[in-house]
Image (cartoon, rainbow, N blue to C red):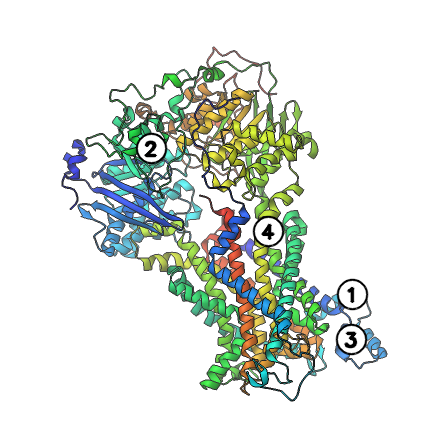
Amino acid sequence: MSTLSEAVGPAEPNDAPPRGLWRQGLTVFCENRLALVGLGLFVLLAGVCFLGPLVYHTDQVHTDLTAVHLAPGEQGHPLGTDGVGYDQLGRLMLGGQTSIIVGLAAGVLATIVGTLLGAIAGFFGGWVDAAVMRVVDAMMSIPSLFLFMLLAAIVTPSAPMLILIIGAFAWLGPARLVRGEALTLRSREYVQAMRGMGGTGGRAVRRHIIPNAIGTVIVNATFQVADAILYVAYLSFLGLGIPPPAANWGGMLSDGLADTYSGHWWLLYPPGIAIILIVLAFNFIGDGLRDAFEVRLRRR
Amino acid sequence: MARYLITRLGQALIVVVLVTVIAFLILHLLPGGAARATLGKEATLEQLAAFNHEMGYDRPLIQQYGMYVQRLLQGDLGYSYQLNQSVVEAIEQRLPKTMVLSLLSTLLAVVLAIPLGVLQAVRRNRWPDYAITALSLLAYATPIFFLGLMMIIVFSQVWPILPPEAPQGFTVAEVLADPAGLVLPTATLAIVTIAVYARYVRSSMIDNLNENYVRTARSKGLSERRVVLRHTLRNGLFPVITLLGMYLPALFSGALVVESLFNFPGMGQLFWQAALKRDFPILLGVTVIISIATVVGALIADLLYAAVDPRVRLRGSAT
Amino acid sequence: MSESIGPTARHSTPAVNAAAGRPLLELRDLDTDIALRRGTVHALDGVSLEVAPGQTLGVVGESGSGKTMTALSIMGLLPPGGRVTGGQILFEGRDLRSLPPDEVRRIRGVRMGMVFQDPLTSLNPTIRIGAQVAEPLRVHKRVGRAEARDRAIETLRRVGMPRPERIVDNYPHELSGGMRQRVAIAMALVCSPSLLIADEPTTALDVTTQRQILELIDDLREEFGMAVILVTHDLGVIAGRADRVAVMYAGRVVETAATEQLFHAPRHRYTEALMRALPESAIRESGGHDRLISIPGLPPDLSGPLTGCRFAPRCSYVSDECRTTDPSLVPGAHQHACLHPVPTPTVAVSGPVPAQVEPAAESVTAAPPERAERPVLSVRNLVKNYPVHGRGLLRRTAGQVSAVADVSFEVRPGETFGLVGESGCGKSTVGRLSVGLEQASAGQIVLDGTDLTDLTGRERRRMHRQVQLMFQDSYAAMNPRMRVDAILAEPLEIQKVGDSAARQARITTLLDQVGLPRRALERYPHEFSGGQLQRIGLARSLALRPRLIVGDEPVSALDVSIQAQVLNLMRDLQRELGLAYIFISHDLSVVDYMADRIGVMYLGKLVEIGPARDVVRAARHPYTQALVDAVPSITPDRAATRDGTTIRGELPSALDPPTGCRFRTRCPHAADICTTEPPLVGGLHQVACHLPLRPEPTSTPTPVQAFG
């Protein structure tokens, strides 16, 4: 069966050994120095918060009114103590755990809810799409902090409750994004080609739409996490955060505000800087992931 | 164009109706309900039942919503027992002040963000671009109250040139009479906004600078200055108009925090205090009004965009 | 100063130079680099060219040859990372590289003008046309607003713009592509430059519009007495218009000569191969077809070091010397850089190399299709309307676009049916309807005796085995996240053909059939070149062993040399597997080469249908004739003897097509009777025209009325 009477010649791709898209994506991610910095920052902060307490033991339950407002270094408190005698470094670790867990969980929850609703709207189109998108429009017109505070005022805030509240209302962004992505992907020629072979809608979603939209979703999820951490901080500042003895960076920061005038700087800057660093970290990671997922767009 | 106008108005109307439904549902579906919220934790069951009956809260939800909308249309947003004031009155006092704060900071942000974003786009991937990008990211990652606090520390403690508290005037005129007090709240709110706008202007300008029409403009032997200012800037800035509308919810959220921090007597502070005291009529009223303000703002931005960009303006007549 | 021997001595073209004294523009050993993230591409390497005043220089080459980079280097418009690294750009005797930037800008704005490829994106969308056209005057000549407006109107009138006094106040998106290109030309000419550079000025346009624009540039050149550099990939465009031609390959000029000389007797083996790869070179006067002479392989990667002749790896006359020695242009009127040039006294180019002709290929068309055989596909009275939604709240239907209006044709087993027409004529919609990608508004699509429009979902899915679509842009038609093995397996999985071992075997066979190595299976689409992707696309459409493949512009995005490879492959597979094709293309010469029968579409209507040879050489419909006349040809005499059935004006909107004959608004022969709709009548060669250009040859047996 030699069809090729003609010398087709070296009609072959480049000679480098084939590499999977994930590998290529990883390479691109690693080429982005900021993304690596972000990843490093996240690993460092999470490591200190979750593993730190194993080696650095402090009492974060009982107040100690004999040791309030100690400056850093005094009586073996490297970062001093706060107004009720909690060790500030230990408290930062504890607060970091809450902030990171709530941020991650709320971000992931928002992404899952948003992705599902966006995909349904984008895939079914018609009145389903119209209904979902009008609700999204309406909820987006309510400034998110107002919405969160409305809810936080009704229910008693706790870490799981914050996750639910933020997760239940931060899905709007991902929903819009995924819907748009689904609409574009649905009209892509490779989906049409598949339909031309007799493929079903289900296959289009499974084999073509999800694998190509997943990158956008994951990238967006990292930004959602960053936003969720900020929201927790805002709610804490506005007095609707998680009540003590639980701690989170946002709450510590807003407690620290009261100490601005009394010169207890160690209560203010460490949680503030920690929040900035973790939010930056997730933004850097998100940017790096975006590049990594765009590998497929790079034609030679 | 006329058709676009009608479509856009219709959409806005639907959104406003949905906003009232959502706010209404949140308040009425959650445990405790409005009665407990209004009368407080000490109220007896009989008191609650009487209140519910009086307010019509024992009727079906649909009917209640109908009554709510009816009152809303008559300009009745309820009564705050805690403030001893009707909700409309409370909002009337504060909404204009929030508008002043939002407008001033938006204005400041636009005036600064456009040149910054253009500079970034023109000097892309060189140090001005990197520096502004880094600062934008930093501004974005900083909780706005932390940022505001640092402004207070720097400008009223270390270098005391500005008051740490916003003007406490009752009317807009009184607020404006104390410009020094407005500087820190406005600047705090503007900084985050600048970061967002500059990023957007940058990417919009870069997109446009890569367009073929820019190459055509260069082929006419125009100076780089003219290529950027006359050919690219307009096209790059048109989308920024819609961003102004889209950014409103975030702006109002920011105002909520800033007002609380600087003790600025606006809608945000009203809402904040109401949330702490569980003053539900105020919470609901403010949420609805601020959302309508958002919808109207976005509508104006979209219409403005449609009016100035010939590609949109003339499409209506073409089809 | 550069080398001692003046370039004028080397490049002497006595006739032109004597008249002008010295060249208007001269490039000497120009080097241009483009810095990319993954390395530096040496886009131009020692390019030397010259253009005399009033002369048209054609620069021709395939993608990546450096032809556009040459134009952009002259204009100083290189993309980011691009830089001229060596050589001189002498314009009116002064080296643009050594002049101050402001001076160069002025020269660029006043003395030179440039027209770009894509008229849809090269005008500023938010500035009125008058202001854009007049801008160079306002900036460089400080002309006042009112005068500038008058000059803009005047210039627009000279480029043939109807009602220019109104157009000046319009925005670009209110005009069609052809009209926008006229605006772009007006913009380039408003300062009366002495040099016009046109970079693929007609590539984005339809052939009939292309012809109008090329003629316009020609007329303006005479009128303004300016020189023109016409950059194009299309040899035919050059053959009809240029005085001299420079052929570029891989960043170098490989041959340059007077147009007639070059086309009659090319010397460089690349030029020769390029001309032979054109479908028109393989069509004999008899209408029979020879096999295309394709150029194997791909052009070299310009980011690495290159030794020897850059064409050597693809050249069939290559010797060891070619691989080591870097040939330079031999001086003279006809310069070429080839160690084994085509001998001078060549016979006409169109004569193919006999050894490579395969008689079998010819017989396909020679034998008239068997009438008795049942058609694979039979399309009857096909109609497709697209509703146009208003933007209102209820999205009421505001009207409908008539994309396909009452089209009927048949495709017989093993036959190629060509469908040709300009953009918007509905040919692609017919293709998509035929493979079931869209639902017809009315009419029947009978596939192997079964009416597709009657079938339910599952049955229709089974029918999909029989007919497959091949896309223009295979890259877009392949999921970028799937490897080639998954891409090829997909149709088999969907149709549940065989187990995984059987599928694997089938995939391997397919890859062999389209001539790709097995290693390709593990790669992703973005790792392949355009021609390779087209092969993979073809393999995928073959996977289910269909009887009919609908190719929607399957070679339109490819360079000529690659196009020939794919066309040959398609014909080979047709012969071997007994496939039928519907070959959809805007390019009449490709359809002419591929098809046994051709249908011509205009604005949703099939206006003419018949044997390929008759439709192209004895067109009966005035529109077909206009298409035939507009196709650029490399045979200069064919280019010369056009009788000029020029069609006027613009394509009407399909939203509100003309009543009666849809072509009558542009037809040179339109008469009163044309307000009634002409039926498609005739025997084997049917036409839908009240006043056909010629009667159907009587020799043709009159068949039964083809379609009921």
Q: Distance between the residues labelled 1 and 2?
A: 81 Å
Q: Nearer the viewer, residue C518 or C113?
A: C518
Q: Is mark 3 on a helix, strand or loop?
A: helix
Q: Residues within 10 Å of mark 2 (few under 14, many from 20)?
A: many
**Left or right: A182 in relation to C148:** right
> Mark 4 or 3, which is nearer the eye?
4
Q: Is mark 4 on a helix, strand or loop?
A: helix
Residue C6 vertical position relative to residue A150 in the rendered view, above or below:
above
Q: Distance between the residues labelled 3 and 1?
A: 15 Å
Residue A204 vertical position relative to residue A274 in the rendered view, above or below:
above
Which chain letter goes with mark 3? B
What x and y, as percent, mark residue C506?
60, 29
Query: Could you tell me the amino acid type at mark 3?
Result: Ala
Q: Is mark 1 on a helix, strand or loop?
A: helix
Residue sitting at x 79%, y 74%: B55
What x and y, as percent, mark residue C693?
43, 21
Are the residues flagged by discs 2 and 4 from a single subunit? no
- Residue picked out by circle 3: B35
- Residue picked out by circle 2: C311
Write down the quadrant of residue C586 in the picture. top left
- Residue picked out by circle 4: A214
